[in-house]
Image: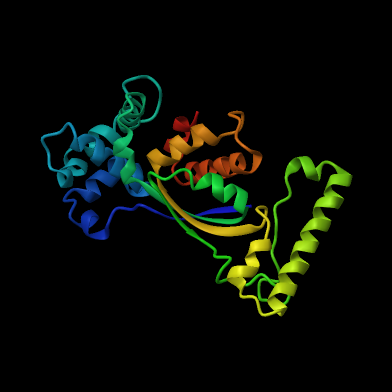
Amino acid sequence: MNVKLIAHTALSDEFVSEITNFEELTGVFHQPYENDRAAIALTAIRCCYSPLKPTEIITEEGEKYFGQSASDGQGGTEADRLIRHIVASKHTSTLEHLTYTFAVEGVSRALLAQLTRHRVGFSYSVQSQRYVRFGSGDKSGGFDYVTPESIQNNHEALRVFDAVMSELQAAYDKLRALGIPAEDARAVLPITATCNIVLTLNLRALLDFYQKRKRGNGAQREIAELAERLREEIVKADPWTAKFFD
């Protein structure tokens, strides 16, 4: 499995150019311009409670929230405190404005079936077994597959499993040689066959997904690993989100 963050929400160049005290603000605090998502979260949250227009919030309140230490004693800035408060009060619709796009590679169709049960806030583009040919002589070189951990740890079970995968590849190749189109030959491909996904989701949806699929919550190993990889990528890009995955 390979999971890579390939895009995320960012402040527009036009919006940044219209912030009248940009130079002053960047001298006081760093996060909004090193981390656009924090600035966008602040704008969305304060929009609900402030008489200011959304375009005015960073200019008028940026120094207050990003330039002062958190008053709740839990570290970070006042912006961190505000976001903590919003998450604790479950007003997390304000986090839906922050989106992340991932390349998810080499996961099984079994994982895909579980993953697509999560609908709200998720968008998927999935490698097609209808249009991509998985014959041994095709560009793909045949289908790859994920081996469950319990089978990996059992020598005899692994021998049986790999033999079946080889037989299914041979059956697919034979069907294609008989003129069967890929969209029908794929019927013999197993649920462990791998696929690639472009996955976009918002922060609220991701936090909900993580709580349901993280390790120790009864989730199957592969999707629990995906949950951890997604968390790692988000926290690497936006360290301020780390506490919300606890």
Q: Residue furthest right?
A: 156
Residue sitting nearer the eye, 126 or 25: 126
Q: Residue at x 19, y 38 (%)?
A: 47
Q: Position of residue 172 (x, y in %)?
A: 71, 69
Residue sitting nearer the eye, 43 or 198: 198
Q: Residue at x 27, y 57 (%)?
A: 12
Q: Position of residue 135 (x, y in %)?
A: 70, 72
Left/right of residue 203 with respect to residue 216 in the rendered view: left
Q: Decide if residue 30 is in sight here.
A: no
Left/right of residue 58 with respect to residue 142 in the rendered view: left
Residue sitting nearer the eye, 245 or 175: 175
Q: Position of residue 233 (x, y in %)?
A: 52, 46
How many marks overall? 0
Q: Position of residue 9 (x, y in %)?
A: 35, 52
Q: Taking 135 as reference, is 242 above or below it? A: above
Quadrant in the picture for residue 106: bottom right
Left/right of residue 14 with respect to residue 150 in the rendered view: left
Q: Residue furthest top?
A: 73
